[in-house]
Image: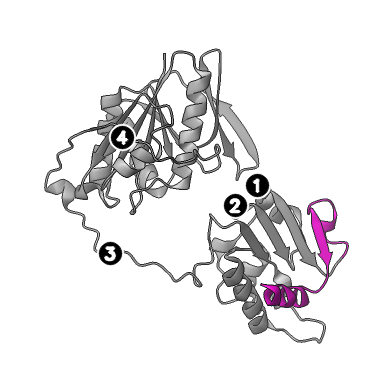
């Protein structure tokens, strides 16, 4: 009989993140497939009661938590103590956690303390005949592999999109608060504050509904024989602001600065989409001035609806790689789109 523990940290406002609710959905689904299994929830943060109440109807047999100002900020010594305590008290055989920065940093150490095994970035879980199988991506998300472990506890961090997010409710959960005492040495690290870029400066937005990808054509000579990089920046940033979209780039655009060509000042390798970049998961994607060749399209494998703007009717997007291709000048199209927005 498997004892499944869902473990997560609360956000600064006391809520659970979207990825945490998605992993909880995976835990609930897995518990339903394993006969005789039980599901419990472990939370840690400044205050966890509100988060526990929001998922009180998830079907968990028990809730436990570690809370206090010592666990408000991400800090290795305090977080690993909280996570290890939650795993140990629950006597869980399977531990599922969201693969966010805070938990991913401490989960391997917690696995060592609990004499368990850990696997990271799991994308899917299944169970058949009482055997649990995990699935994850390999080779820059170009192939998947499935595997299982006999060692318990088996601890897994799960990627976003593993399941549908569990809807929150307004119930009341009884939480067993655990006491975790920290020494002065464990509290040496202090978080003095946080600095975040403005909304306009932040171009990478994983939770945005739309991904806007700019290709090298934006900084090439246009119909009048001139380069209009400043105008291109105005169109792109205008769309990102109005549509609250995330920004991606083809490899050629982020690399051409080293070749002495015009570049977009806000573009970096962090925006790169494709075989050597990221594979984002947005509802919709709009590629502009991109040719839609294989390395770039690989990064679009998880985009649900794909559209592209390209002046070349024979570009790669026209070969069945886009749901809709607009054969037009991207400058003209985005000027009109921004006016409508």
Residue located beneath label 4 in the image = 110
- Distance of mark 2 from mark 1, alpha carbons? 7 Å
- Distance of mark 3 from mark 4, alpha carbons? 26 Å
Comes first in the chain, label 2 or label 1 = 2
- Distance of mark 3 from mark 1, alpha carbons? 35 Å
- Distance of mark 4 from mark 1, alpha carbons? 32 Å
User: In the figure, is residue 174 to the left or right of 60?
Assistant: left
In the foreground, 203 or 284 = 284
Res 158 seen here: no
Residue located beneath label 1 in the image = 302
The image quadrant where one finds the N terminus is top left
Q: Which residues are magenta?
A: 313-341
Please tell me whether mark 3 or mark 4 is closer to you in this view. 3
Pointers 2 and 1 in contact (C-beta within 8 Å): yes
Residue located beneath label 2 in the image = 280
Image location (x, y in percent) of residue 52? 34, 38
- Distance of mark 2 from mark 3, alpha carbons? 29 Å
- Neighbourhood count class around disc 1 (C-alpha, 10 Å): few under 14, some 14–19, many 20 upward: some
Pointers 4 and 1 in contact (C-beta within 8 Å): no
Q: Which residue is the extreme one toward the right?
A: 314
Judged from the image, the secondary structure of the residue bearing numbered disc 4 is helix
Image location (x, y in percent) of residue 282? 61, 52
Taking the magenta stretch, the answer to whether it contains residue 206 is no
Residue located beneath label 3 in the image = 193
- Distance of mark 4 from mark 2, alpha carbons? 29 Å
User: In the figure, is residue 138 to the left or right of 330?
Assistant: left
Comes first in the chain, label 4 or label 2 = 4
């Amino acid at each position: 009989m498997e004892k499944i523990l869902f473990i997560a940290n609360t956000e600064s406002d006391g809520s659970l993140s979207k990825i945490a609710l998605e992993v909880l959905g995976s835990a609930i689904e897995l518990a339903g497939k394993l006969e005789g299994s039980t599901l419990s929830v472990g939370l840690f943060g400044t205050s966890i009661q509100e988060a526990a109440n929001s998922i009180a109807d998830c079907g968990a047999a028990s809730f436990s938590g570690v809370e206090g100002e010592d666990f408000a900020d991400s800090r290795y010594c305090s977080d690993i103590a909280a996570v290890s305590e939650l795993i140990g008290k629950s006597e869980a055989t399977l531990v599922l956690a969201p693969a966010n920065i805070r938990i991913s940093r401490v989960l391997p150490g917690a696995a060592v303390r609990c004499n368990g095994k850990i696997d990271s970035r799991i994308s899917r879980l299944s169970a058949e005949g009482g055997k649990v199988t995990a699935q994850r991506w390999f080779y820059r998300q170009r192939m998947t592999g499935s595997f299982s472990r006999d060692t318990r506890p088996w601890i897994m961090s799960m990627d976003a999109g593993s399941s549908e997010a569990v809807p929150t409710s307004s119930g009341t959960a009884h939480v067993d608060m655990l006491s975790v005492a920290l020494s002065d040495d464990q509290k040496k690290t202090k978080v003095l504050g946080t600095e975040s870029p403005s909304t306009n400066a932040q171009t990478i937005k994983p939770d945005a509904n739309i991904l806007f990808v700019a290709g090298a054509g934006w900084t090439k000579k246009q119909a009048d024989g001139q380069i209009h990089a400043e105008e291109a920046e105005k169109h792109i940033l205008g769309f990102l602001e109005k549509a609250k979209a995330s920004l991606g780039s083809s490899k050629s655009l982020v690399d051409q600065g080293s070749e002495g060509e015009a570049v977009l000042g806000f573009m970096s390798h962090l925006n790169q989409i494709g075989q050597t970049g990221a594979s984002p998961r947005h509802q919709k994607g709009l590629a502009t001035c991109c040719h839609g060749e294989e390395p770039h399209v690989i990064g679009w494998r998880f985009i649900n609806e794909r559209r592209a703007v390209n002046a070349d009717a024979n570009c790669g997007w026209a070969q069945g790689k886009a749901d809709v291709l607009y054969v037009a000048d991207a400058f003209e199209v985005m000027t009109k789109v921004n006016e409508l927005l």
